[in-house]
Image (cartoon, rainbow, N blue to C red):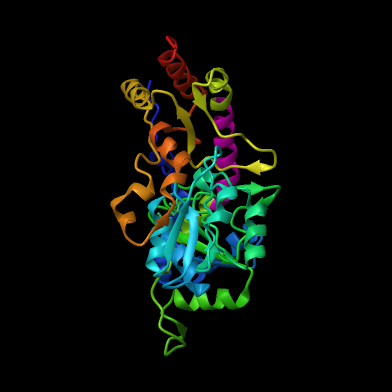
Amino acid sequence: MEVPYNYLPYEFADTDNIFVDWKELINSTDFTLGKYVKNFENKFAKFLGVKHCISTNNGTDAIILALKALGIKKGDEVITVANTFYATVGAIVAVGATPVLVDCDSQFQICVDKIQKAIGPKTKAILPVHWAGSSPNMNLILDICKKNKLFLVEDACMGIGASINKKNAGTFGNVNAFSMHPLKSLNVMGDGGMVVTNNSSLASWMEKYRNHGMIDRDHIEFWGVNMRLQPLQAIVASHRLDALTNTLSRRRHNAKILDEGLKPLVDKGIVALPKRLDGYLETFALYMGLFRKRDKLVQYLENNKIEVKIHYPVPLHLQKAAEKNCVFDKTDLKNVEYQSKHLITIPVHQYLTETQLSYTIDCIIKFYSDD
Ligand SMILES: *Cc1c(COP(=O)(O)O)cnc(C)c1O
């Protein structure tokens, strides 16, 4: 049996309805912004329960746009977590600011207790990540932001459809960013992203900045850039948004099967999974756990045709890039370092069968059977 990590061949096996809309778009030749982009933005804003949604090229640009809209610039510090994708930190550096990396907790999310210690006179914003499609305690982070007069920008790139007590990921902060990269919960056939906010003046600035600062064809208000979402992708995004509830409920179902199957190993202390907290809905963009003898298990699973990943083997603060323009406390990133040595991401996608899931569980249990 094979358990593939990549679900895209299944997801896009039937694209007939997408082609119907693409055909209409192609006939209209409305290839920059236009009706399809606007319709998708409105639909996404409604889905999320926010006033303004501005689509972008990709999630990285969405974070950059959010930080720029809040005026974050050279000399400012932005606090984020050390176990995230490169783009979170890259975006902070791209606006000229300095990333301050803090440790994660046993939930694999930014450690809220350690945020306070990282706040200094130059701190302007906290940029928590909905890592793996789970969420840190956003209400506590929001309190810290309010108390210290800091902006809150959520990196909800993996969190489309996640929520805490029915409040959606990406609706807690001042301006929040999402990605529609092929491996996210709402994905397109290439790149796409979004920023959302309830603040009308920030929204209006971002809408213009994304499109050269233009007011109309012949006038610009300020110098901007081109961060536009392609209409072809807006069409894909709209169809994927229709399917999102179903996609996520299948991923959650699969995650539950894995949780139950791995429980004996969790009870023995061989495997550690994050707690599934009451009121937290996750997207399971990644199903991650910490595993004893990680590297041997990875090899064993690969030999048994179960495709797994590691997110990521080299923590950000140990990357060469972090030697410059990055602040962190070397002694206090122990959880992130431990995770980089023990973490495995297991296939959980919506096209897996229960047989594939049981096979995965059985292989892992067999691997530890001599322990
Ligand atoms: C995917 C991702 C990004 C970047 O999104 P792109 O659309 O690939 O640019 C940023 N942050 C996190 C946490 C992500 O998972």
Q: Where is residue 343 in the image (x, y as percent from the top left)?
A: 43, 33
Along the horizontal axis of the image, is 94 left or right of 38? left
**Residue for point 60% across, 45% down:** 245
**Residue for point 52% across, 23% down:** 354
Q: Position of residue 13 (x, y in %)?
A: 41, 41
In this view of the protein, can residue 158 be seen by the observer? yes
Name, please, the residue furthest toward the bottom: 218
Along the horizontal axis of the image, is 223 left or right of 251? left
In this view of the protein, which residue sits in the foreground, 66 or 361?
66
Q: Where is residue 337 in the image (x, y as percent from the top left)?
A: 41, 39
Residue range (magenta): 241-257
Along the horizontal axis of the image, is 285 left or right of 277? left
Q: Where is residue 51 in the image (x, y as percent from the top left)?
A: 64, 68
Q: Is the magenta stretch mostly helix, strand or loop?
A: helix
Name, please, the residue furthest toward the top: 370
In the rendered image, residue 87 lying in the magenta stretch gets the answer: no
In this view of the protein, which residue sits in the foreground, 277 or 121?
121
Name, please, the residue furthest toward the front: 331
In this view of the protein, which residue sits in the foreground, 124 or 289?
124
Tell me: residue 366, above or below residue 285.
Answer: above
In this view of the protein, can residue 161 be seen by the observer? no
Q: Based on the displayed image, in which of its 4 quarters is residue 46 positioned?
A: bottom right
The N terminus: image quadrant: top left
Q: Based on the displayed image, in which of its 4 quarters is residue 119 positioned?
A: bottom right
**Residue for point 52% across, 19% down:** 265
